[in-house]
Each structure stands twice: as C-alpha cells, then as structure tokens.
Amino acid sequence: MSTATLSASDSDAEPRIDYLFLGAAMVATAILVALVLLDGQPASAALILGGFALGVAFLKAEFSYTASWRRFLTRGEAGGLIGGLIVIAICALAVVPVAALWPGFGGAVAPLGPSLVIGAFVFGIGMQLANGCGSGTLYTVGGGSGRMLITLAFFVIGSVFGSLSLPSLLALGGVDPVLASDYLGPWGGLVATLASIALAAVIMATVAKNRGANFMPSRTYIIGGIVIGVLCIAVFFAGGHPWSVTFGYTVWGGKIFAALGFDFSQAEFWQWPGPKRALTGSVLSDTSSLTDFGMIFGAMAAAAATNRYAANAWPPFKSLLAAAIGGLLCGWGARIGFGCNIGAFIGGVASGSLHGWIWFLAALPGCMIGIRLRPAFGLSRD
Amino acid sequence: MRKTYMAVVLLALVAIVGNHLTSPSSGRAVSPEDFAGACAPCGAPCPSKK
C-alpha cells in the first residue's frame, strides 16, 4: 500500500469512529460466517475470521511488502523485508513439518520453469505501479483507498487473462517442485528452510550496511510480523494449505466473465479439477476467497474504528492509470507465477519449496523496472 | 468516495450471497491443491505428468 496514502488520510482527521462502515464491515462478516456455518463448515468460518484478523493486523502495522521492496531497492533499507522474513520463519515452523507428517495438509509448491520466472518478473513491475501486492491490495481496499479499488478491479481482470495464458507458458517446459522435506525429511527440511531465511536476512542486512542504511525492522514491523506469522499458521490449520490470496481473484474474475457470457469450456486452465470446481461451486467454498473477504472486511472495520472512512478525494488520473496497469500486470503475473508475495513467496518459502526463492529473485528486477516507471505516473520512487 | 464504497460493499455482498445460494457448496472449502495431480496453488499439473 500505500502506507503513505493511509498515513496521510489518518493524520488529517480527528480520531473518531465511523459507525456506518464499522457496522457494514461487522454485518458483512457476520453474514458470511453465518452462511458457511449453516452449511456446517466451521473451518470456513475460521478462514473468514482468520482473514479478518489479518486485515486488522496488516492495517494496524501498515505492513507493506511493496513499500519494503521499494525501500530496499532505492535506499538500501532492509528492515521491511527482514520484517517479512519474520512472518515466513514463524509460518515455516508449522508448515514444513505438518505438511510432511500430517495427512490432509500440504505446502505451497509449484513447478520451476519459465512460467514462474516470467510471472514473478511481471508481478514485480505491476506491484510497484499498483502500489500494492495481493495482500496489500486487499487491506488497502478494505482500508478505504479508492485508488486501490481500481487496482483490485484490474487485478481480477489480469488474473483471468493469466488463467488463459498459463497452459501455453507451462508448455514451454519446467521441472517438478523441489521441496526441502522431500530430500531432508520434515525436520531436516525445516532446518534447511530456516537456514535459507537466515541467509537471506544476512544478505539483506549486509547490503543495507554497505549502503549506509538501516536493516533493523521497526518495532511495529516486528510485532506485526509475529502477529501475521501466527495468523498464517492459523489459516494453514484451518485451510490445510498455506495462506494464498490471488487464486480468489481468478475465481471472482472467472465467475464475472462467465456471467457476462464468456465460455470457458475450451480454456484448459478452467478444465483442471481445482479451477473447474471453483468456477461452478460457491465462492464461499474456495479457501482463498474466504480469507480474502475476511481481510477486506477486517481492514474496513479497523479503519472505520479510528477514522472517518474513505474520506479522501480520488487521486489524479495518472495515478489511477498506474493503478489499472499495475493491477493488470499483477493479476497476469500472479497467475503465471503461481501467486503473489503471500502465495508464492511467503507460502513457498515457508513450505520449504524452492519456487519461493526463485519467485523472489525473479520479482526483484521487475520491481526495479516498476520503480523506474513510477515517476511517469506521478508516483515517487521512494 | 464514501458513496462509491458503500455501493461497492453492498454490490459485492449481494453478489457473494447470491452466488453462494445459487451454486453447489457441498463439503468443506477447498483449494485447487487438494485435487489429484495438482502441482501448484492454482491446480496446474506437474511438468512430469504432462
């Protein structure tokens, strides 16, 4: 996000409760929870509530992966990214061993190949133009940023385009997922995963020191990282897989396009069992959608509990254009690259899957390009 | 922007509830990874299986 966007709006207003939007967020969440409980699905209710808590945590900590990447690349500041690694390390403590030992649970894995690299690279460009990644878009939309409503709409559209492109990109080749626990066992895999996270933190801190920049996460980021990491574990136990965001966007887009008359019967992606079921089934049967809805309403409740909600004017046209282009690129890239910062990077690394680190390395140059493009849309490079 | 937001929230809620009530929702919520042959969070097959 748009940490800057929220901070600016927050500082202008007297602290007050916006009962209208606080009530709307609570009632909407209650309705969704009631619907899944009526279907006898307590795990689904837990996913909605887990998403709600994540929305509150992200908004309150202003936890922004997009801004963290940008601060690292432009100023060398590594505190934000290292705060992100805290989330991954905590999540890995549960995901690696449980996914390996406990039937019914699985990690976030993905094939290694051109699709992963191209998708992550394009996503990196998009997230800097959009000013938010998958989770950032959710909590800033929930937080009352009109600009990010545009990002979300185009993220969804781009995600559907990505679903149509993915099979042909997978046909370019690749290798099966590489999972640390497959080679080293559950505990050896956990040690290797934590060691890789520690190594990344050391490299980031070294880069920061060499550039004379700070590498210590702020107190807010440390607390936020711990809380978000614990919530990631809760979502993992409720859903059976690590938290993911962007498949929900693809499902929403697929359903909207289908309602508009688009025929997916010839689209290979939508014939795979998972997407096919998601397209025809209830949106509340998709784990990503459940946490996504919860996160939006959680951020909305947190924002409305402290300020007049969505009180800012719309940003300039060029900024909205960047939001739209960034959203499209994020959506396409996330689908091609098997997720966003959450599903691919956090979920992948926390599962001990090599694709998480490849995604990170491929997104890095994309971010650099995205940062260079920002001034053309009236956005700062910082 | 507040009016836009309220309209979007109401529209989204009606769409979610409408979709839920008119679509099959048997069993627990699933991810594409839960299906046999899935090799990625979106349900893509493994390269070795193609």
Image (spheres, rainbow, N blue to C red):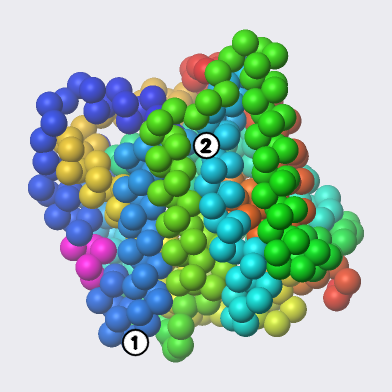
Disc 1 residue type (three-letter): Gly
- Give the chain letter at badge 2: A
Q: Residue furthest top?
A: A212
- Give the chain letter at badge 1: A
* Residue A376 makes an appearance in the image: no
Camera-side residue: A193 or A272?
Answer: A193
The image quadrant where one finds the N terminus of chain B is: top left
Residue A360 picture location, percent across and down: 70, 41
Q: Identify residue for label 2.
A: A83
Q: Residue at x 24, y 41 (%)?
A: A303
Q: Is residue A375 toward the left or the right of residue A259 in the image?
A: right
Report the magenta residues as a range.
Answer: A27-31
Disc 2 residue type (three-letter): Gly
Q: Residue at x 44, y 64 (%)?
A: A234
Kindly indicate the quadrant of the structure image that contains residue A176: bottom right
Residue A219 picture location, percent across and down: 40, 31
Circle 1 or circle 2, nearest the eye: 2
Residue A355 picture location, percent across and down: 75, 53
Q: Identify residue for label 1.
A: A40
Q: Residue at x 49, y 70 (%)?
A: A237
